[in-house]
Each structure stands twice: as structure tokens, then as C-alpha cells.
Image (tube, rainbow, N blue to C red):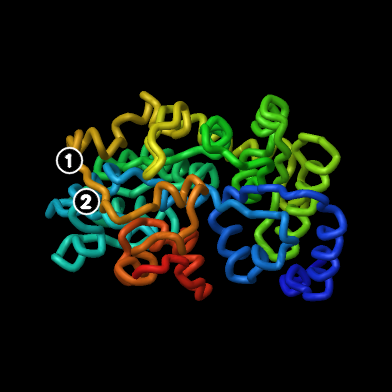
Amino acid sequence: MKYLDEYRDPALARGLLAELTATATRPWAIMEVCGGQTHTLVRQGIDELLPAGIRMIHGPGCPVCVTPLATVDKAVAIAARPDVVLASYGDMLRVPGTTGDLLGVRARGGDVRVVYTPLDAVRVAEREPGRQVVFFAVGFETTAPANAMAVLRADELGLDNFSVLVSHVLVPPAITAVLDAPDNRVQAFLAAGHVCAVMGFTEYEPIAERYHVPVVVTGFEPLDLLEGILMATRQLEEGRAEVENQYVRAVSRTGNTAAQSAMRRVFRLTDRDWRGIGTIPTSGLALTERFAAFDAETRFAVGDLDTREDPDCVAGAVLRGVRLPTSCPAYGTRCTPRTPLGAPMVSTEGTCAAFYQAGRKSTVEER
């Protein structure tokens, strides 16, 4: 295939669905970990076209959604300072904190800017030496190399007015946490193709072996997902538990070693809180001692804050895959993309936003 529309060919999709129907002889539960995959599944209606026994469980694959509430509150506090420029990807601006969001800070006169790469923030720091520039560094392994390069570039330039508020999370520990949960129902995983393009998939091999669970590295187009689901179902039906690579056009087993090297220079492993989920050991990245001077939390002394989630938001259960957005009483009424109670209704990778944008109706009888 050479062109994007070939990955959305209806005839090929029908063929994959027919093969999947012929393959599945019993019910199976498969989790896609990536929010981008969730949006494709829901937007294209793939989850509703699958054979009756195949159930897709939407996992915690939205980095914006799992950014801890405390970290959002710290970003809001830092952005409100008159001497600070806070630079962020656009998704983070409307993520609700305890008392507001970054968009509200900007509306009140705070200098909150949307950037498209972390190096944009470094360039702001170069141009405006009299301001402190903070980049809100969130994301999975996909964005970590670019964020590492921003720190390396700032260090090379000797910028003492640049820092990063780090909230990086890692996929393999999240998969392990899902599998270790007492209410786990997941029997196979679709691994995120962009994460594996950076990291490869060797980290998933011990998971597949230990838990006897298939893992299929999968892309983001409709045919990618249908093929990934088919590959996972074949493994389940045959009693196999291996790591397979559907996304061969972008992913190799060892990944991008140069990107991994940059990450290792700048970041170290740390325990990380996941919004709505809790602490997952060694599931995040923090700055190494060598680059600790670029840590915005330390620079601006934002320690423990009094954080409070909205009591009506079930985002945690949605992120764990134990509830659907449509089962939330606030879905589509109090909670919409314009008035979100939780991050999954904000992000372009959030499950609640995916359901809302696809026009999925609430299943709650009493509104």
C-alpha cells in the first residue's frame, strides 16, 4: 500500500471482518492501549462491527488524560506567575485542574502559549531572556525524545530561563498494572505503534511470556486495527501468547536507538501517579541529576497542593477500561468537550471525547 486511502478501503475491511468472524469461536476481550487507536475504532464504528464475541476495552492510552491532577494544578500555579511564559501543547490548556485550567489562566492575563514542538519553547527562552519559560512536558515514550532534545539544546545554549514540568509516563508498566488489577478482564493487547516506533517491542516480550497474553503492535488506520485485532484473536484461539508486529512499515523490534539514547541522557525512571488510576511504580520519567537544574517543580517550589477531583467524574474507571463513557450520568450533559469534568472529554485522544464526537448516546436511563 502506498496511499492513505488504501488503509481505509471498505472492501478490504469487509474481508478482514469476514476472516475475523470465521476465526473467533468464543468471546475475547482485547484492549487497545492508545487513545489514537480508540478514536479510530469509535469514529469508524469498528468496535460495533466486530463479531459479537470480540469486545474492545479502551485503555489508559491518552497521555493528556493520565497526567496527574496535582501536576495540572502545578502548571496552573506556575502559569499564573507574572514572570513566566508557560508553553504547552494545545490539548493541555483545557484539562481541568482543581480550581481551573490553563486556558482560564490565559484569559486572566497569564502568558500561556501553544507550541508545536518543545524546541519552540527553547526558542522563546532565547528571544526573551528576561522571562522564565516553562515547557509542560507530558506524553508517553513518543514525545520523550523531543523533550529530551529540548533540554539538551537549552543546556548547550546555557539558558538559565528555561525549564520543564515533566509528566512523562510509560506504556509497559501500565499494561502490567492492568493485568495485575483484581478486576482485569483483558486477554490481549494492541500496543501503540508510535510508542513502539521509538522503543521497539522488546519490553513487551517478558509481559507476554509472564502473563501469557498476546501483544500485537498495531497502527492507527482502520485496516491496521482490523488486522491487529485479527492477529490477536488468532493467537487467543490457538493458545499462543507472543509479541507480533502488524505495524511493520514503521516499527522494528529494537526501535529508534538514537531517540532512546537521548532519553537515557536526560531522563531516569521514577514512580508516577496516573490520574484516576493511582501510583504505578517505575512508570514515569524524571530528569536525571545532571539536568536537575531544568526542573520547573524545583525552580518554582510548587510542592504538595490540595487537589480535588470532581465527584461526578468517572474518568478513572474509564481509563482503567472498567466503564464506558456512556455509562457516566454526567456524559453529554454536565460533561461535554466545552464543559469537561475530566481530561478524557478534553483530549483528542480521550475516550469520552471519542464517544461524544461519534455521537454515542448515553446508556443512563435517569438523566
Which mark, residue 98? 2
Q: Establish if 281 lies above or below 159.
A: above
Judged from the image, the secondary structure of the residue bearing numbered disc 1 is loop
Earlier-in-chain disc, 1 versus 2:
2
How many residues crowd mark 2 within 10 Å: few (<14), some (14–19), many (20+)?
A: some
Q: Establish if 178 lies above or below 32.
A: above
* Amino acid residing under circle 1: Asp
Q: Where is residue 358 in the image (x, y as percent from the top left)?
A: 53, 73
Depth order, front residue of 240/299: 240
How many residues crowd mark 1 within 10 Å: few (<14), some (14–19), many (20+)?
A: few
CA separation in Å, label 1 and label 2: 8 Å
Which mark, residue 306? 1
At 81% across and 70% down in the image, what residue appears?
A: 14
96 left or right, relative to 327: left
Q: Position of residue 84 (x, y in %)?
A: 19, 52
Q: Establish if 31 lies above or below 176.
A: below
From where the camera sits, is residue 339 visible?
Answer: yes
Judged from the image, the secondary structure of the residue bearing numbered disc 2 is loop
* Amino acid residing under circle 2: Thr
Dots 1, 2 in contact, CB < 8 A? yes
